[in-house]
């Protein structure tokens, strides 16, 4: 990794305005993201984890300008993407790509695999028609598919094969950064490992940077450089992979890790788990202060009033928690 971030996200906010009631008579605001600060370093895999609805996917979509940010900045090579309209954003689409959760819904059923992968190369003028077949064959080979698959349609492929096609389509643009939005969760467990290893191989070959969005902590531990933990639209903790798995500081992170099954049955039967009480609050009306205080086993009075500062508790280890001991800040 280099010293300068590939992407810098500053005070990112994304709110959705919705109407409630049988006839839409009430207006409300969904606080999907609030005050996200994040640096994504070139060549790393930064993973985002957390419960469903915590804002992981919204973060990825907003970084790519698929959702327009309510406020904040998304800096890529010095350019604030949040200020660009769609025409101004188009040149950056080459560098910033995404792999969605469901490969079948992201492929046009009327286009062959070859047409789906070739389309972005032609659109961005990355290959002439004479060069197209060689580039297509190379991409299919890189993702582990025979070149004859170029003539097949999405319904003729398995889920794992379709996801390989989607990855090849993202690579066709020669990107620098790829958001992997739950890219393996729709696949069989036996196929998940193959796709994860493929992503790692492609990262080395193409010098890619990933934002990896997932809920499977075992997979996250295998693929990540750093891990960010989100709760109800805010970052709770961010640290290098090994640090966050061996020395989590935030009580929510500890609760997530305690839910991961142990391989050793004897240890699994005897270990202490931290079971969170209650449900995740609604993003329509998030709690005041720390958003986790309604379920936190160590919540204090200050947690109900003040939003905890996003601070570096240890070198490279950031956390937003009033209860982190002072000595951890050395």
Image (tube, rainbow, N blue to C red):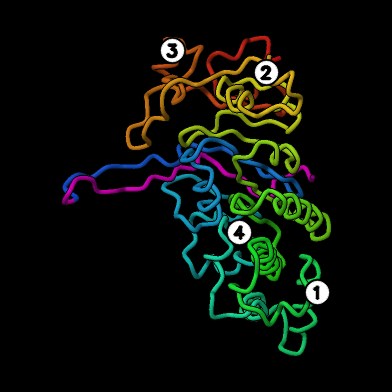
Point out the image quarter for the C terminus. top right
Query: Quick one: label 2 or label 3, which is nearer the N terminus?
Result: 2
Say what secondary structure mark 4 lies in. Answer: strand
Of marks 2 and 4, the one in the foreground: 2
Query: Quick one: label 4 or label 3, which is nearer the N terminus?
Result: 4
| Residue that mark 1 sits on | 138
Point out the image quarter for the N terminus. top right
Q: Mark 4 and mark 3: span between their CA atoms?
A: 40 Å
| Residue that mark 3 sits on | 302
Query: Quick one: label 2 or label 4, which is nearer the N terminus?
Result: 4
Of marks 4 and 3, the one in the foreground: 4
Q: Mark 2 and mark 4: span between their CA atoms?
A: 40 Å
Q: Mark 1 and mark 4: span between their CA atoms?
A: 20 Å
Above-or-below relation of 287 to 64: above
Q: Residue at x 76, y 70 (%)?
A: 145
| Residue that mark 2 sits on | 269
Above-or-below relation of 232 to 268: below
| Residue that mark 4 sits on | 98
Q: Residues within 10 Å of mark 4 (few under 14, many from 20)?
A: many
């Amino acid at each position: 990794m280099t010293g300068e971030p590939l992407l810098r996200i500053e005070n990112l906010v994304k709110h959705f305005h919705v109407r409630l009631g049988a006839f839409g008579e009430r207006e409300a605001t969904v606080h999907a993201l609030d005050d996200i600060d994040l640096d994504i370093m070139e060549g790393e895999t930064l993973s985002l984890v957390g419960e469903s609805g915590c804002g992981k996917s919204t973060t990825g979509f907003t970084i790519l300008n698929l959702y327009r940010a309510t406020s904040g900045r998304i800096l890529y090579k010095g350019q604030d993407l949040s200020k660009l309209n769609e025409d101004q954003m188009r040149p950056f689409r080459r560098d910033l790509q995404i792999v969605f959760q469901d490969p079948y819904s992201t492929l046009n059923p009327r286009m062959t695999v070859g047409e789906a992968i070739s389309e972005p190369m032609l659109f961005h003028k990355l290959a002439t028609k004479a060069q197209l077949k060689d580039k297509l064959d190379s991409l299919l080979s890189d993702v582990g598919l025979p070149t004859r698959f170029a003539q097949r349609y999405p319904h003729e492929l398995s889920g794992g094969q379709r996801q390989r096609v989607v990855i090849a389509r993202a690579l066709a643009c020669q990107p620098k950064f790829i958001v992997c939005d739950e890219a393996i969760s729709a696949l069989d467990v036996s196929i998940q490992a193959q796709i994860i290893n493929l992503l790692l191989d492609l990262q080395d070959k193409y010098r890619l940077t990933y934002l990896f969005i997932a809920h499977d902590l075992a997979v996250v531990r295998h693929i990540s450089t750093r891990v960010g933990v989100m709760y109800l639209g805010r970052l709770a903790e961010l640290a290098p992979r090994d640090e966050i798995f061996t020395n989590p500081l935030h009580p929510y992170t500890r609760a997530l890790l305690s839910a991961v099954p142990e391989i050793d049955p004897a240890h699994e039967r005897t270990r202490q788990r931290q079971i969170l009480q209650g449900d995740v609050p609604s993003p329509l009306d998030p709690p005041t202060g720390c958003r986790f205080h309604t379920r936190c086993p160590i919540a204090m009075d200050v947690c109900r009033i003040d939003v905890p500062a996003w601070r570096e508790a240890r070198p490279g280890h950031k956390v937003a928690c009033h209860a982190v001991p002072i000595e951890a800040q050395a």
